[in-house]
Image (spheres, rainbow, N blue to C red):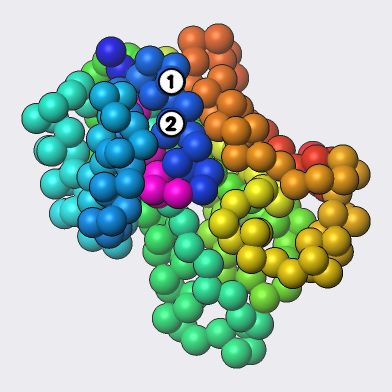
Amino acid sequence: MKTALVTGASRGIGAAIAQRLAADGLFVVGTATSTEGVENISAALGEGGTGFAMNLHDPQSVQDMLAAIADIAEPPQVLVNNAGVTRDNLLLRMGEAEWVDVVDTNLNGTYRVTKAVLRGMIKARWGRIVNLSSVVARMGNPGQSNYVASKSAIEGFSRALALEVASRNITVNTVAPGFINTDMTAQLTEEQTAAMLERIPLGRMGQRAEIAGTVSYLVSDEAGYMTAQTLHINGGMYAA
């Protein structure tokens, strides 16, 4: 049984991805930053996986997490870098801490985890890496220069890495969701939701299961010839 590592798996899109991959027959390790998040992951996955605490800012925490996986499962051959944060502000008002936290979590965190699991994939001569971007990486979004920069960089990182590891039968792709029905979007007012839907040709928000289904395909054997690509799932809001 292959092991899949999904970061930021305690809620939202990450939780949906973790549960879908477990249903596909993978043993899923989901990460969170809090004890409550870890417990939620383990409860949701049941026998199909478990939760672990990990701090993306700390390289040692990443290594400790992989050591813990080695005690219960095979090294991850599937990696989904989903964890991310936002610290929205106009650039003129954005403090350096707001910039650094977002870039270090979203971009540097992806680097740290990917590098840590890559050796095992190379040894196995098989691997699937899926990195989560966003529609705003291409469209831009005022007040999110830090977030947009991190997600744009993740797309470039993925393309470059895909070329480095293709000869080892490892694929690297990016999924860029648009507006998805999550806890965050559920907090929007009716007016905000209506304004958002006006920008989406399909006239609705995406569902977490639709993102999870795309990731499920990308990590499967059937997607073995797809690499260095960004898949846009945004209801037509942005045409690549």
Q: Which residues are magenta?
A: 3-11
Q: Quadrant of the N terminus?
A: top left
Label 2, secondary structure: give it.
Answer: helix
| Residue 92 to residue 226: above or below | below
Residue under label 2, please give it.
19
Return the x and y of residue 2 as percentages of the image width and height. Answer: 30, 17
Q: Residue 93: which quarter of the image?
A: bottom right
Q: Is residue 106 left or right of residue 141?
A: left
Label 1, secondary structure: give it.
Answer: helix
Residue in the image at 45% along x and 41% along y: 15
Q: Is residue 41 left or right of residue 157?
A: left
Residue under label 1, please give it.
23
Q: Is residue 193 left or right of residue 198?
A: left
Q: Residues within 10 Å of mark 2 (few under 14, many from 20)?
A: many
Q: Nearer the viewer, residue 138 or 235?
A: 235
Q: Is residue 171 left or right of residue 182?
A: left
* Residue 106 in view here: yes
Query: Is there CB contact under 8 Å for labels 1 and 2?
Result: yes
The answer to if 168 sits in the magenta stretch is no
Residue in the image at 56% along x and 15% along y: 223
Q: Residues within 10 Å of mark 1 (few under 14, many from 20)?
A: some
Which three-letter amino acid code belongs to the residue tagged 2? Gln
Which residue is the extreme one toward the top?
Answer: 222
| Residue 68 to residue 171: above or below | below
Return the x and y of residue 188 as percentages of the image width and height. Answer: 70, 66
Residue in the image at 35% along x and 19% along y: 26
| Residue 234 to residue 193: above or below | above
